[in-house]
Image: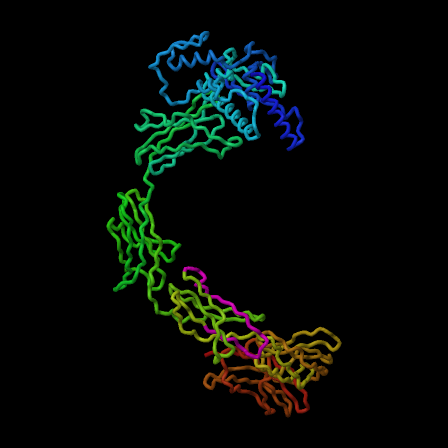
Amino acid sequence: MKTTIYSFLCILSVIIVGEAAAQQNARQDTSLQAHIGIIARADKDSIVVRWAPMNPAAWFSGKESGYMLERAKVMNGRTGVFEKVAQEGFHHWTSSQWLQRLLKRTGHEHFDSATGTEHYDSNVKLTDMVIDYEVLAGSLLYDSTSGGSPTLGFNNVSELSERKNSLEMQVAVALLAADRNSAAAEELGLRYVDHNVDAGQTYSYRIYLIKQPRVFRVDTGLVVVKNVPYFRNSKNTITPFEGDRRIRLSWPANRQLGSYFVDRSEDDGRTFQKLMKVSMITLRQGPITSADSEGYLDTTIEDYKPYIYRVYGTTSFADEELVGEVKAMGRDITPPENPIIFNPKEVPIHRAELKWRMNEPVAKDLAGFRVLRGLSHSGEFKPITKGLLPQSARVYYDSTYSDTLPNYYIVEAIDTAKNFSRSFPSYLVVADTTPPAIPNWISGKMDTNGVVTLKIKANHERDLMGYRILRANAPEHEFSSIRESYVDPESPRSRDTVYYDSVTTRTLTRYAYYRVTALDRNYNESPLSAILAVPRPDLIAPVKPVITATHVTDSSVTLDFVPSSSQDVQRHVVYRRLENAKRWDSTAVLSGTAKQVIDTAVKQAVVYVYAIEAVDTAGNRSGYSGAVTARPYPNTKFEGVRDLNVTYDTSAHQVVLAWTPPNIQGVRYAIYRSIGSKGVERYAEVREPGAKRYADIARPALGIYNYSVRVFGADGKQSKLSEQVSIEVKR
């Protein structure tokens, strides 16, 4: 056997070294090194130590040489001297020991190890199907069919790989037996219970092969444990998933537990029966994480009968611990067969006839049917039947369907456990010839880039599908469609009421004209709306005004001008600057039809330059008119009117001015008027030299009127404007 093991290990070593050299430049001593794992735990008055070789090479070496276990005390963080716990080490049982144990456990009375003669009662047989881990461990040690030792003579790489997998499986099964049964662990030489320990003392244990193999090295395993009572607390929440004649249990995986058993009680916990003869083991790649779970599926139950489950887990020390307990029962979650629905149709007196059928045989637990209606085949469906229709129902008449919206129907079959199945949706075709109402405009506006914003007053038809926008360059022209917004009535876009268009602004056509129609889901179209004229933005500057005359006095400058001839002129702005200055200042803002302006904020003998600019309703400016100059002459005293007052004749509806005339012959009077806050303008003239009053015969509108009077002499001299008087005209 030694020669065989050595030969196998030589081959295995060559393979390992060759693969390592091909994949990475690893050191030879690292690639030819095996490992022995070791764990320990305190248990009342003892410490249990378990160890295990981690690959087939270490396993066969351990079987051949045995293991040496040493112990040392750990004081203040320092490890003392290691001492052997057993001078002869630990070895697996001999074949005689194992066979004698087997015969005793299976009912054989005794065994003569010298002659190999067995004496047993032939009526005693193994009937329990639970795995006997002691028998399993012995068979792995001595059964010739188990592949107990490696041999040479492989024909190809495939046979070598198969043999390698077989050896790895043998080691895994042996270690499983040691984990699940303490006797099997001792039988394999992989367990020791140390009773020579002190309470609260920390110990360090190390395990190594008694004899190292020649080809590779098996390192030493080391574990530190404190002798304090072991607290078993593996309990977790067991989550049940209740199904139809089945219950699935799930609980978090625990790296301390290697396998599980499940017990079940059918009498409210008074008695329990095991549900499996062998423990459950979950094979994983890599370490257990918090997301991993274990589970068990019980398919031997009755629905609506309560069961209590207890889950137990086993540790590597062969301890059995309660994981948790849960109560659950199976429930009927299987729905009836889907109804098969036929196309609904309209029948007289505004009803929709809906028929369906069920394949035979119909489920015995069928409770009835329910009819639902929706606006689309994939949208929300709402019940239209009150309660359940009977099991025998195969037709239903709906008198509440919509004439304008789509009508989709489904039929639900419901059983006594409230499980239900649905038919495919079916569409009711409804004849609709009523068009939507005529749409109405809210507004239309065009910006300077030619972008037109159109707003429509929303239609309220439930089956409205959208609008069609039409445009023309003149109201008498034919309108052409420029935009259609038809979408499914269920879409919010079918209710859009703001639309955009783009047109040119470089045209003599003053307006763009629009009309709109509405369509429903059956393509019924409303009549055309009223015409909406959207003005194009005014980008043309108005014509410049022309100053025709200037009149100066010692206190004012009067400009006569021809206003801009553009129709959309809104105002005239008067500008003034000093003769040698460059900056223009605005001095007055006049109406679009004004023809004269008087500047009284002047100084005598100062030369002023004047210009006038026209502004239209779009804010376009004409630019300055031709400039004129004016110089108020030095002051010469010229008497004006005195005691100016104003009254309103309610019977004649006239504003009457009265004053005391100056003691000068051959004078005339100029009347100036303004309304509200507007600038004062020359309004009328009285040529009678001795006149003392003036009646404004123009029937005035309501508001505040302001008046002043200037006196002109025969030689062209003129007085200053009198003080201003005001009157408010009321009803």
Q: Position of residue 68 (x, y in %)?
A: 57, 14
Quarter residue 400 falls in: bottom left
In front: 144, or 584? 144
Residue shown at the point (42%, 65%) measured from the top left: 465
**Does residue 642 appear in this view?**
no
Residue farthest to the right, as pictured: 580
Identify the image quadrant of the C terminus. bottom left
Specify whether residue 521 is painted magenta. Answer: no
410 sits to left or right of 482: left
Q: Position of residue 58 (x, y in %)?
A: 57, 21
Q: Position of residue 97 (x, y in %)?
A: 46, 11
Identify the image quadrant of the N terminus. top right
Q: Is residue 447 above or below residue 563?
A: above
Number of marks in the rendered image = 0
In front: 456, or 620? 456
| Residue segment shown in magenta | 490-515
**Does residue 56 appear in this view?**
yes
In front: 558, or 112? 112
Q: Is residue 4 above or below residue 475?
A: above
Quarter residue 440 falls in: bottom left
10 sits to left or right of 441: right
Q: Is residue 665 above or below residue 70?
A: below
| Colour scheme in use | rainbow
Q: Position of residue 12 (x, y in %)?
A: 60, 25
